[in-house]
């Protein structure tokens, strides 16, 4: 007896009519999702699903990741919390963020890490990775902490910034590098040069003096010292927020050990204009520099030197940012605006959508060893950032979900906008509206899983 017709394939979600941004380029294809994972491409029109998203006129990117944020909780919930920061991330088209440890108290031991892992449950709107901060007193514990579930890596502040985490001397830096095996993320500035130069400046100096205090040599010297120690110990390094032409050229000789992050701000703003227009709202570490370094950052994006673009989202209260320099704290908001700003760079022809997906999805996954995220591929998490590349919007303060309520990109007209965010097969944002309750989970990291299996 001949078999009857096969039943139509069933999916939980189908995304129809969009242009998928795949590792090898852009392709018009329908995508089927089952049980939170990508199940198929080229889904036939006869297939059925519980939810069908009409993506006609949209590009479907793999779910974008901001691997460098400061959500400020615990300790500063008046400017940001895990709930508000991940809400902002989802509104801005992100599916995951990696949160820094310089909170109050800092995340530097197993007890505080366990608290934070538990705390994000039911509060985070997107998935989260967690950094553990290195100190001079927790060196021996780092090898165990770096393989805890949800930990994306160890963060070292080799130069002082917001918070009290600082490991500035070579002996302590080497000790950190010799405890553990995963890639370490560094804030690379030379603390000794920073302190030696501080008396050259006074309160009330123009805000551009921030760039002069934390000058090119401060950053370059910090990176040279770190790379010498990384070469000596064999420990892999991820140099965060690289901001100088000198560092970018230098790091090309360390590709066997080092990966590179550049911030959206250093690709978008430059001195002196940013300080004249924004004053304290343009002050960040490392500082925004002049056009020579802006152009070098873009050249490094184009030639592949840059692995990751992040926001370094670091909110402060507006009244503090209005204080005279250097009393105004360093740090800018960015988790909600990084995708629209980078899409505008795509529209301007500075990079392609596949390169954007590499910098904000495949790149973070590669650097940190993320499992199940990083590209559009069968079996991967069904994470999608759907964008309208023809949508024109103006970024404004009143769009910002963070309690601090401001953005350094206020008034910026952009072309390209995130219109839907899908997290593990569930639509969580559509046209500036969040959908459902927070259901973010801990990001899975391969090094952690492999080490746990070995144990």
Image: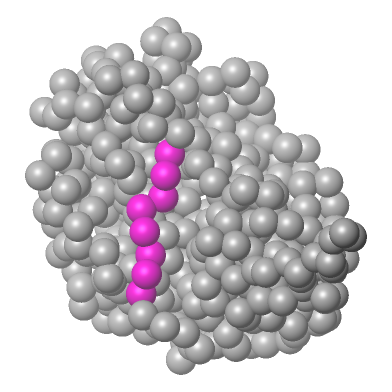
Q: Give me the residue at 27% from left, 75% from top.
A: 79
The residue segment tinted magenta is 438-445
Q: Does residue 123 sit above or below 64 in this rendering?
A: below
Query: Residue 186 location in percent, x, y?
Result: 39, 36
Query: Is 444 in the magenta?
Result: yes
Q: Does residue 128 sit above or below 29 in this rendering?
A: above
Q: Give me the residue at 77% from left, 47% from top.
A: 23
Among all residues in the image, which is located at the extreme front? 1
Q: Quadrant of the N terminus?
A: bottom right
Query: Is 346 in the magenta?
Result: no
| Relative horizontal placement of residue 418, taking residue 257 as reference (left or right) | right
What predominant SS class does the magenta segment belong to?
loop
Q: Is residue 327 visible?
A: yes
Among all residues in the image, which is located at the extreme top? 232
Q: Does residue 363 sit above or below 357 in this rendering?
A: above
* Foreground residue among 39 and 5: 5
* Foreground residue among 294 and 208: 294
Query: Residue 63 location in percent, x, y?
Result: 60, 61
Query: Residue 183 location in percent, x, y?
Result: 43, 28
| Relative horizontal placement of residue 118, taking residue 363 as reference (left or right) | left
Determine which quarter of the picture holds residue 181: top left
| Relative horizontal placement of residue 32, taking residue 234 as reference (left or right) | right
Q: Give me the residue at 89% from left, 60% from top.
A: 2
Q: Give me the residue at 60% from left, 71% from top.
A: 12
Q: Is residue 314 visible?
A: no
* Foreground residue among 25 and 353: 25
Query: Residue 78 location in percent, x, y?
Result: 21, 77
* Total tally of numbered discs in the picture: 0
Q: Quadrant of the C terminus?
A: top left
């Amino acid at each position: 007896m001949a078999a009857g017709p096969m039943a139509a394939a069933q999916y939980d979600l189908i995304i129809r009519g969009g242009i998928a941004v795949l590792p090898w380029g852009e392709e018009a294809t329908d995508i089927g999702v089952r049980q939170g994972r990508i199940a198929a491409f080229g889904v036939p029109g006869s297939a059925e699903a519980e939810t069908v998203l009409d993506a006609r006129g949209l590009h479907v990117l793999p779910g974008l990741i901001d691997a460098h944020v400061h959500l400020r909780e615990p300790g500063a919930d008046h400017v940001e919390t895990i709930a508000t920061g991940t809400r902002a991330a989802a509104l801005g088209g992100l599916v995951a963020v990696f949160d820094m440890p310089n909170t109050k108290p800092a995340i530097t031991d197993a007890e505080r890490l366990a608290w934070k892992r538990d705390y994000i449950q039911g509060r985070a709107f997107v998935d989260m990775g967690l950094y553990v901060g290195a100190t001079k007193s927790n060196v021996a514990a780092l090898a165990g902490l770096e393989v805890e579930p949800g930990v994306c890596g160890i963060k070292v502040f080799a130069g002082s910034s917001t918070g009290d985490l600082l490991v500035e001397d070579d002996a302590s830096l080497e000790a950190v590098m010799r405890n553990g095996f995963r890639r370490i993320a560094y804030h690379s500035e030379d603390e000794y040069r920073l302190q030696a130069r501080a008396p050259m400046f006074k309160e009330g100096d123009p805000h551009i003096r921030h760039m002069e205090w934390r000058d090119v040599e401060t950053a370059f010297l910090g990176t040279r010292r770190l790379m010498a120690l990384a070469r000596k110990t064999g420990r892999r390094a991820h140099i965060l927020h690289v901001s100088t032409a000198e560092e970018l050229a230098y790091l090309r000789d360390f590709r066997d050990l080092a990966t590179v992050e550049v911030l959206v701000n250093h690709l978008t703003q430059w001195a002196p204009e940013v300080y004249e227009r924004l004053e304290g709202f343009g002050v960040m570490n490392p500082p925004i520099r002049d056009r020579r370094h802006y152009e070098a950052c873009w050249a490094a994006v184009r030639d592949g030197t840059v692995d990751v673009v992040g926001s370094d989202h670091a909110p402060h209260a507006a009244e503090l940012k209005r204080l005279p320099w250097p009393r105004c704290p360093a740090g800018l908001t960015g988790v909600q605006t990084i995708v629209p700003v980078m899409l505008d760079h795509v529209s301007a022809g500075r990079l392609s959508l596949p390169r954007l997906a590499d910098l904000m999805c495949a790149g973070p996954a590669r650097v940190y060893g993320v499992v199940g995220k990083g590209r559009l591929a069968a079996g991967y998490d069904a994470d999608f950032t759907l964008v309208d590349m023809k949508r024109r919007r103006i970024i404004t303060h009143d769009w910002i979900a963070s309690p601090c309520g401001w953005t350094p990109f206020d008034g910026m007209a952009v072309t390209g906008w995130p219109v839907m965010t899908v997290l593990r097969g569930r639509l969580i944002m559509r046209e500036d509206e969040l959908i459902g309750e927070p259901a973010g989970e801990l990001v899975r990291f391969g090094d952690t899983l492999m080490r746990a299996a070995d144990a």
